Image (tube, grey):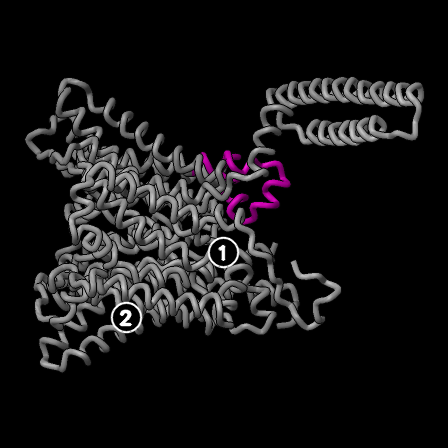
């Protein structure tokens, strides 16, 4: 912490000293450990496969097809909303690209049009959420039906096959041993990190997520910011369509990609983004994307079928959300429930007594160390303190018993009243 | 006296369900003009038979939404209970159907209790908790089925008849739905636990202060929702005489849609069984109507999505106007 007396009055930034112990136990680092652990498991069990050139690349590529969705979803979750229409948006964008390609428009224009289509879908969501004040869950559930419905109407049972050639390269090629998809993902993630952690726009997202009323009164245009966030989400869904179509080998039908939205949300939550909004860092989900890819691949190699993997992803999701709630409060609650019979008076009594005892034992230590006193005085004082401690302990015990008996009486009375 | 009369008339005119009923009537008239073949008792019966499962899910979903939560795992619960019931039924064909019904309810209640535990006692966000259990239950459904499908010839007659048999010319599955509607109407309107569900959804803090045990009620709502989904799963397999692990995928969205159409507020605390009944009727008529139009069956999901958006918008605007009206009556300056 900066010294408050020396810091200039206008500086509001709080610079914390870098602490290695704190750095090593933060959530992002735990994710890194998990990633390393999975790698070690894979390395030891399937060592010949692991060290074959190309394996790691293909593992990473397998997880990259939804990576841009994750980045967009972080912003949406950050402002306290949720978007479950991203898979449908993605398919809509792919459809627009495919249809414009069929019409004979230059391929680079088609790609841009596809991404723009995603942006328009996002803007529609954002308009309804931000300006019409509709709950984002409902809006995006219904727009996911709407967008996918539109794709179904246009495509019916046809499959679009005409896509830009570089889509497939994007998903399957490597540059100097590094997958192109990973490179692009990291570049995008760097951009998002700058936006979220180093720009005013990013700080606005945190404020809105923590308290949107407060954000309004601080002069932030909440509506416009939310709309921007949803448009970014839509554009990212459009970009995802490039990876996705390439991954699928350049064919799109109306039923593809269902469930991607849930995978993206799961990765964000695993990465430490709070679904209540306003909490989390961007590094977490980036690592979580890789974890998910490695986990899926490892479990697949170990002969765990796709549906059992679903169970594991579900449990991981729940456990990842529950881990932050394991704190002092939880242990206090458990103690309250089991030791103090759920009675807060008893808890307060015992806590107070414990504090007094602690203070007294501190005094005892001090007297023991005190060289100014002679032995007789010391013994007398110690005896006095010890007597006091014993008295407090006995009194607390008696009072606890009395409170417990009172509680029992109250319960008996209450049950009598309810029976009669 | 005069005042009361006026308020009665006003409440009918301004009631939440009046708009819904008018929309429903308009829809029926349009359907009558375009597809008169829809208007026969047998086609209506088929329509309701096909939609009974949605209605059951919607009733459970309503309870959860009123507490301020949401349950995305009902479709997976439906799949799990359906798979367990039909797999055991095909191995033990001599057991009476009622056992499988109870088993389905039990399986569903266990799933719901798990949801209720992590939402109510561990304070997880309902959306994320049930998103996770949605994966988990669907995975368990696959493990229980082993990837197997069950076809009509594997179903015993008693099992199938439990849903498709007729009493007084009405399918059993419809009778069950009607009984559920009545039961939950009484439960929500006239019993203490039912009223507590509303109290929690309206304001958690004040409910706590009033002495309501919030975790318990949330747990109860999720368990009931799961139990209804379990029952729906068993009845689904009995109704269509087919079962596989992926059945009912996406039904949670339709259940939520019915609730929203029926005026259940997604922020909790508002909603009633009559609204849900009208919402369910509307949803089934719309789906059936679209399926009757030639070449329009692909439009179904797009139209459903659009309808939900419009319904929520109408809900929000009527809510705003109601607020303004209340303020006006109190003489507040607007």
Q: In which quadrant is the N terminus of chain B drawn?
A: bottom right
B101 relative position to A279: left or right: left
Q: Is residue B202 magenta?
A: yes
Residue that label 1 marks: A279
Residue B15 at x, y = what percent? 46, 58
Among the 4 quarters of the image, the one containing residue B83: top left
Q: Tell me which residue sits at (78%, 17%) in the image.
A: A394
The numbered mark at residue B212 is: none
Magenta extent: B192-221
Foreground label between 2 and 1: 1
Look at the numbered discs 2 and 1 and tell me whether their residues touch, using CB distance below 8 Å.
no
Q: Position of residue A346 (x, y in %)?
A: 70, 27
Tell me if I can see residue A231 in this picture: yes
Q: Is residue A254 located in the magenta-colored stretch of the structure? A: no
Frontmost residue, B7 versus B88:
B88
- The residue at 46%/71% (across/down) is A225
Residue bearing mark 2: A118
- Quadrant location of residue A182? bottom left
């Amino acid at each position: 912490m900066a010294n408050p007396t020396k810091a200039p009055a206008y500086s509001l930034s709080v610079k914390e000293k870098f602490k290695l112990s704190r750095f090593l136990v933060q959530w992002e680092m735990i994710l890194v450990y998990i990633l390393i652990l999975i790698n070690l498991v894979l390395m030891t069990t399937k060592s010949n496969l692991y060290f074959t050139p190309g394996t790691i690349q293909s593992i990473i590529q397998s997880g990259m097809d939804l990576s841009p969705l994750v980045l967009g979803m972080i912003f949406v979750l950050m402002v306290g909303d949720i978007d479950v229409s991203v898979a449908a948006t993605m398919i809509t964008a792919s459809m627009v690209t495919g249809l414009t390609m069929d019409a004979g428009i230059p391929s680079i224009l088609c790609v841009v049009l596809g991404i723009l289509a995603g942006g328009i879908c996002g803007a529609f969501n954002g308009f309804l959420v931000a300006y019409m004040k509709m709950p984002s869950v409902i809006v995006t559930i219904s727009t996911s039906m709407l967008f996918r419905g539109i794709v179904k109407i246009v495509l019916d049972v046809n499959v679009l096959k005409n896509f830009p050639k570089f889509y497939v390269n994007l998903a399957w090629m490597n540059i100097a041993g590094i997958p192109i998809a990973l490179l692009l993902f990291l570049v995008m993630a760097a951009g998002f990190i700058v936006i979220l952690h180093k720009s005013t726009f990013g700080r606005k997202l945190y404020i809105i997520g923590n308290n949107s009323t407060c954000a309004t009164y601080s002069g932030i245009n909440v509506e416009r910011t939310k709309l921007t966030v949803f448009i970014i989400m839509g554009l990212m869904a459009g970009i995802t369509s490039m990876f996705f179509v390439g991954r699928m080998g350049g064919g799109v039908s109306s039923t593809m990609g269902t469930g991607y939205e849930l995978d993206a949300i799961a990765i964000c939550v695993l990465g430490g983004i709070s679904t209540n909004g306003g909490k989390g860092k961007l590094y977490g989900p980036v690592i979580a994307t890789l974890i998910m890819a490695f986990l899926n691949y490892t479990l697949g190699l170990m002969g765990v079928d796709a549906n059992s993997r679903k169970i594991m992803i579900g449990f991981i999701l729940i456990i990842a959300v529950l881990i932050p709630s394991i704190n002092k409060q939880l242990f206090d609650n458990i103690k309250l429930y089991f030791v103090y019979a759920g009675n807060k008076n008893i808890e307060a009594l015992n806590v107070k007594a414990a504090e007094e005892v602690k203070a007294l034992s501190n005094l005892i230590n001090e007297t023991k160390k005190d060289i100014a006193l002679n032995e007789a005085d010391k013994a007398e004082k110690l005896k006095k303190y010890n007597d006091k401690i014993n008295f407090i302990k006995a009194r607390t015990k008696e009072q606890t018993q009395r409170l417990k008996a009172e509680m029992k009486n109250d319960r008996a009375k209450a049950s009598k009243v309810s029976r009669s | 006296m005069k005042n009361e009369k006026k308020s009665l008339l006003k409440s009918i005119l301004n009631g939440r369900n009046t708009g819904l009923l008018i929309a429903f009537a308009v829809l029926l008239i349009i359907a009558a003009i375009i597809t008169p073949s829809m208007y026969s008792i047998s086609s209506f019966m088929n329509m309701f038979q096909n939609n009974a499962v949605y209605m059951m899910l919607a009733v459970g979903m309503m309870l959860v939404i009123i507490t301020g939560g949401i349950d995305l795992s009902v479709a997976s619960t439906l799949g799990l209970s359906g798979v367990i019931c039909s797999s055991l039924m095909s191995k033990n064909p001599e057991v009476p159907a009622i056992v499988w019904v109870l088993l389905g309810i039990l399986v569903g209640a266990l799933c719901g209790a798990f949801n209720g535990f992590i939402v109510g006692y561990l304070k997880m966000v309902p959306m994320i908790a049930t998103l996770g259990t949605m994966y988990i239950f669907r995975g368990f459904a696959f493990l229980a089925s082993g990837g197997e499908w069950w076809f009509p010839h594997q179903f015993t007659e008693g099992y199938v008849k439990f849903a498709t048999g007729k009493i007084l010319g009405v399918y059993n599955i419809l009778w069950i739905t009607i009984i559920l509607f009545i039961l939950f109407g009484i439960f929500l309107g006239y019993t203490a636990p039912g009223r507590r569900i509303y109290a929690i959804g309206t304001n958690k803090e004040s409910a706590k202060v009033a002495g309501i045990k919030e975790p318990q009620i949330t747990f109860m709502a999720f368990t009931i929702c799961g139990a209804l989904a379990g029952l729906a799963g068993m009845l689904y397999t009995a109704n269509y005489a087919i079962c596989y692990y992926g059945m009912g995928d996406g039904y949670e969205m339709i259940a939520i849609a019915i609730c929203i159409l029926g005026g259940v507020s997604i922020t909790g605390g508002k909603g009633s069984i009559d609204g849900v009944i009208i919402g369910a009727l509307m949803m089934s008529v719309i789906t059936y109507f679209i399926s009757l139009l030639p070449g329009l069956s692909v439009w179904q999901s797009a139209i459903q999505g659009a309808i939900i958006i419009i319904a929520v918008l109408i809900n929000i605007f009527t809510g705003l106007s109601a607020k303004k009206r209340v303020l006006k009556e109190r003489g507040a300056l607007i």
